[in-house]
Image: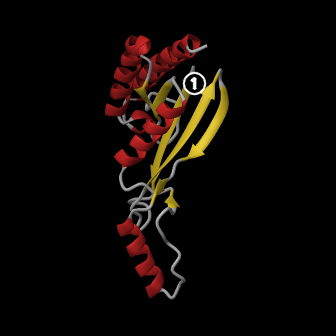
Amino acid sequence: MEIGHLEISTYIVISVGATHWYCSIYIEDNNKLIEVKKLERELTSKEIIALNKIDRERGYPITHKMGNMTEGFISKEDAVSAGVKYFKEKYTGILFDSGYGSLSAWKKAIVYPHELTELVNKMNALADQFQSLNGYEGNNRTLVESIDNQWYKLYIKLIGTTK
């Protein structure tokens, strides 16, 4: 059974004028990376008009048209939805929302087979605790390490059930 990791990122707040979210998906099977993909979506007609207007004002050639793809999603929710859709179309395993890609209790399972519900619920409860403490950026390192270790033990058990 495959394990997917959905990495969502953005430059919003970091870069002036940034407005998009990005989604990459990493798929493992038997602890081997089998796919890495940056997801894309089709530009909307409003975006095409706006991009062509900006290009025209800058003296650039008009190149945006229907059918053009972009890696930028309008919202985090749109990026996550695209990742879930892609995963469900190709795989039957477990998909984690990995935030910015670290393997720790930040990760919550968002797609998983019914038979793993009990294990996933335990992992997700630990992820909620970990996140409420702001992970390793927070002030309670001992508790955070304990939660993270518990999460890892469950992750190892999960990997054992997917073979």
Tell me the residue at 40%/15% (across/down): 114
Q: Is residue 71 left or right of residue 81?
A: right
Q: Is residue 140 left or right of residue 70?
A: left
On the image, which quarter does residue 44 sit in?
Answer: bottom left
Q: How many numbered tags mark residues here?
A: 1
Percent coordinates x, y for residue 101 in the rendering:
52, 39
Quadrant of the image containing the N terminus: top right
Amino acid at pointer 1: Glu
Tell me the residue at 53%/84% (across/down): 60
Percent coordinates x, y for residue 36 in the rendering:
62, 41
Residue 133 sits above or below residue 15 on the image: above
* Location of mark 1 (residue): 2
Q: Is residue 45 left or right of residue 1?
A: left
Task: Judge by depth and name the residue closer to the eye, 100 or 64.
Answer: 64
Q: Residue furthest front?
A: 66
Task: Judge by depth and name the residue closer to the eye, 147 or 114.
Answer: 114
Q: Residue furthest left?
A: 132
Tell me the residue at 41%/58% (across/down): 20
- Callout 1 secondary element: strand
Percent coordinates x, y for residue 54 in the rendering:
43, 80
